[in-house]
Amino acid sequence: MGFLRKIFHKDTTTDVLELLASQHKEVDELIAKLEHGSGPRRGLLTQLADKLAAHATVEEKLFYPAVMSRDTDDQLHEAVEEHLAIKRLLADMVEMRIEDDSFDAKLSVLKEQVSHHAHEEEEKHLFPKVKSMLTADERAALGNEVLVMFEELMQGHPSQNVPRETAKAAKLPSVR
């Protein structure tokens, strides 16, 4: 993290917790637009799938390993399993017709799973632990790393990787 601290001036840093919470909000807004038919639904689904795929990747590759501790171990392993369930729903939704009767049902389940994972598990329980574990500078450096990776992933279509990522769960090292 020291390398990133040197690259980014303090005024341009992004606290990782604020960044992840803002991504959660963007996902909530996309889900709401899909539910209410605000715009071309296929395009909205692609945006949602790309953002969720990129978000899960940066959490699994950067954020979770950086905050792994005895206090967060169980929660982070559960979070990876929640990501897998979300990716499986997304894989189904991306391959189905939007007009399919079960599309809206899957969207409803996706909304519930994302809301539980993002707001109940992460924002309410994990983020306060992380805030006490990492200094503001460490959170800013990690936020910048996460932002760089997220933006790189969004240059492609990260959701295209989702179907093959659902064959097995991502693995995090354990502290036990």
Image (cartoon, grey):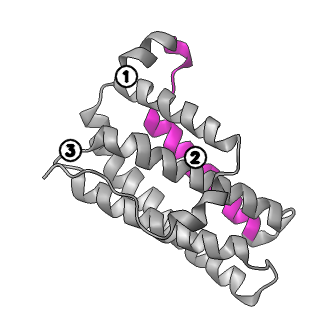
Question: Closer to the N terminus: mark 3 or mark 2?
Answer: 2
Asked whether 100 falls inside the magenta stretch, the response is: no
**Position in image of residue 174 (x %, y %):** 21, 52
Magenta segment, which residues?
9-34
Taking depth in this image into account, of 80 and 164 the one nearest to the observer is: 164
Taking depth in this image into account, of 143 and 169 the one nearest to the observer is: 169
The residue to which callout 2 is attached is 23
Eye-nearest disc, 1 or 2: 1
Q: Residue furthest bottom?
A: 101
Q: Residue at x 45, y 18 (%)?
A: 4
Marks 3 and 2 close (CB-CB < 8 Å): no
Residue 137 appears left or right of 163: left
Q: CA distance from mark 1 to mark 2?
A: 22 Å
Taking depth in this image into account, of 115 and 106 the one nearest to the observer is: 106
Amino acid type of the residue that numbered disc 2 sits on in the rendered structure = Gln
The residue to which callout 3 is attached is 69
Crowding near the residue tagged with mark 1, few <14, some 14–19, many ≥20 C-alpha atoms within 10 Å: some
Amino acid type of the residue that numbered disc 3 sits on in the rendered structure = Ser
Q: CA distance from mark 3 to mark 1?
A: 17 Å
In this view, 14 is above or below 42: above
**Position in image of residue 162 (x %, y %):** 59, 62
- SS for callout 3: loop
Number of numbered discs visible in the structure rendering: 3
Return the mark for residue 1. Answer: 1
**Quadrant assignment for the N terminus:** top left
Q: Residue at x 63, y 36 (%)?
A: 151
Q: Quadrant location of residue 47?
A: bottom right
